[in-house]
Image: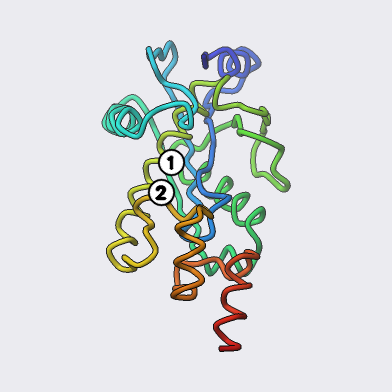
């Protein structure tokens, strides 16, 4: 289970504002990648907050409401659209989101805990934690906010493009999604730099 140990170590080292950062949506073929940054208060505790992938959708929604309505918690979430992902690639888009989410916090963090690998050209002190969403409460909170934000966006997009089933698979390359891509071709929300989408687009261009 996550703790505040990493946050407390940074505070003990002199960093006053410590944020956790995580993303949702690097792997899908459609929709944005969402990145959240969260600053939790000292002494924060939560009985079930964990890596968003370990929780049910209903529990994620409940925790999201708790986190985002708590006045003692500062947070920000950004969404990088498919066109930008195609322009600069998914890694660079994720890194851009990780920078922007932290810089949007007020006050800005002195240090951040990032889920995964280090981010190049980061504007503040960073510590990267592999599987950080299962180690740090701040990262786990960011994972929940990013995931729920993105899922809600995909539900909204499913109303604009009902033929793809975005509300079910959230843009991931499931058999249903791939079959819809082959049948209908890509829509404006698809990432054309991703192989399965590019292949379907080529087939439609040739048809």
Residue 165 location in percent, x, y?
37, 58
Neighbour class for label 2 at 10 Å: few (<14), some, many (≥20)? many
Label 1, label 2: how many angstroms apart (C-alpha)?
Answer: 5 Å
Viewer-nearest residue: 141 or 75: 141
- The residue at the point 27 percent across, 32 percent down is 65
Residue named by callout 1: 147
Q: What colour-coding does the image apply?
A: rainbow
Residue 146 location in percent, x, y?
44, 41
- The residue at the point 46 percent across, 31 percent down is 52
- The residue at the point 31 percent across, 65 percent down is 162
Q: Secondary structure at mark 2?
A: helix
- Quadrant for the C terminus in the image: bottom right
Give the quarter of the image for residue 164: bottom left
Residue named by callout 2: 150
Q: Circles 1 and 2: CB distance less than 8 Å?
A: yes
Q: Secondary structure at mark 1?
A: helix
Viewer-nearest residue: 14 or 204: 204
């Amino acid at each position: 289970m996550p703790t505040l140990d990493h946050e407390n170590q940074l505070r003990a080292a002199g960093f006053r504002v410590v944020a956790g950062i995580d993303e949702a949506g690097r792997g899908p073929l459609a929709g944005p990648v969402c990145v959240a940054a969260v600053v939790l208060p000292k002494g924060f505790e939560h009985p079930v907050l964990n890596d968003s992938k370990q929780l049910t959708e209903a529990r994620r929604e409940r925790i999201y409401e708790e986190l985002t309505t708590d006045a003692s918690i500062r947070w920000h979430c950004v969404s990088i659209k498919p066109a930008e992902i195609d322009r600069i690639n998914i890694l660079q888009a994720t890194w851009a989101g990780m920078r922007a989410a932290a810089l949007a916090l007020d006050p800005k963090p002195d240090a951040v805990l990032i889920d995964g690998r280090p981010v190049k050209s980061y504007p503040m002190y960073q510590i990267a934690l592999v599987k950080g969403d299962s180690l740090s409460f701040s990262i786990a909170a960011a994972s929940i906010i990013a995931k729920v934000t993105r899922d809600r966006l995909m539900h909204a997009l499913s109303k604009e493009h009902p033929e793809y089933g975005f509300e079910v698979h959230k843009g991931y390359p499931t058999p249903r999604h791939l079959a819809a891509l082959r049948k209908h071709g890509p829509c404006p929300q698809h990432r054309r730099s991703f192989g399965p989408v590019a292949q379907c687009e080529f087939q439609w261009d040739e048809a």
